[in-house]
Image: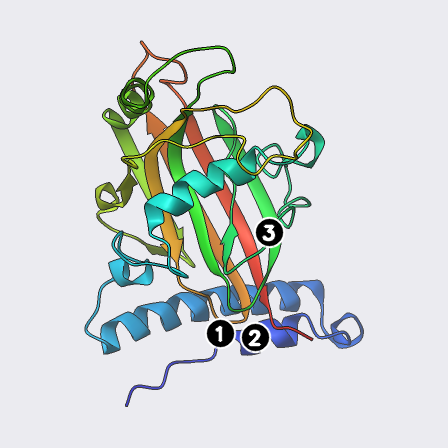
Amino acid sequence: MLRTPDPDIAAIVAHHPRNGKGLSASTVEALEALSRALRILCLTSIASAAGADPADLTLPLGSPVAGQDLAWYAQDWWQWAFSMPTDQSPIRDDNGRLCGVYQDGPVWYLAGGFGSARIHRACVVPAGRFIFFPIINTVVTTMPGQTRTCEEVRAEAALNNDRYVHLMVEIDGVQIPDLQRTRIAPETCFDLAGRAPPDLEPRPFYPSATDGFWVMLPPLSPGDHRIEFRAFYTNPDTPEGNAVQNISYDIRIQRAP
């Protein structure tokens, strides 16, 4: 039986409340670097010992979570993103202070950014939560008073995702391969305002459609993790056809007290 190193040991030492008395700043920095290296080694060793590859760090598209498929979560993610006031939006958040807004249920949503975005955030996530996020995606909606069909908005949402150049996801330094397989294009349409406050007017925003590349992670182990995702479109003839996403998260998985 392969026993992998515990990546949390160095982190615990580095962040011990007494480190200010006994450890220099350079020593703490070295221990934090050791913690990150051990976590990468741990993930790689686990995958090797199980005869698996890094693709197994994510859930396949056909895997239900709490009774719902990933296409349902792609639509629900957009309803979540549209459900809060602008000044509370995790998508507009530039440092992670809003990552916990309106988070409930078994899946924790991570945000990208509107249009083109380069953002680093820090976020605390309760232990036991799945983590779901878009590498890059598009939503097309129908404004109140407009008349469009579901087929029309689905076709428009697909345009940018038919022409991408780069997709990258790293979990604790382990790069996930074959990200083309993560594309989700739900066959149904939805109301973008489906989770918005009842006093939001006018409504509904139906039909809306989303299309893009998404990752669902199983619950991560307690401690510190890093998630990075980058992508860009190359379709200059469409809205946001040159969008670039470059997002990183320092995630702390925290056990319940």
- Quadrant holding the C terminus: bottom right
**Tag of residue 69:** none
* Observer able to see residue 229: no
What amino acid does circle 3 point to? Gln
Tell me: 85 left or right of 157: right
Q: Which residue is pictured at 44% across the width and 68% down the height?
A: 39
Q: Which residue is pictured at 47% across the width and 79% down the height?
A: 6
Q: Secondary structure at mark 3?
A: loop
Dot 2 and dot 1 residues touching (CB under 8 Å): yes
Q: Is residue 34 above or below residue 246?
A: below
Frontmost residue, 237 versus 138:
138
Q: At which x and y percent is residue 255?
A: 61, 73
- Give the label, 3 or 1, closer to the camera: 3
Q: Is residue 255 above or below residue 107?
A: below
- Residue behind mark 3: 103
Dot 3 and dot 1 residues touching (CB under 8 Å): no
What amino acid does circle 1 point to? Pro
- Residue behind mark 1: 7
- Residue behind mark 2: 10
- Give the label, 3 or 2, closer to the camera: 3
Tell me: 171 left or right of 127: left
Quadrant of the image occupied by residue 244: top left
Q: At which x and y percent is residue 161?
A: 28, 28
Q: Is residue 239 above or below residue 131?
A: above
Structural crowding at the residue carrying mark 3, measured as other residues with C-alpha within 10 Å and reported as few (<14), some (14–19) or many (≥20): few
Distance of label 3 from label 2 (alpha carbons): 30 Å
Extreme-bottom residue of the structure: 1
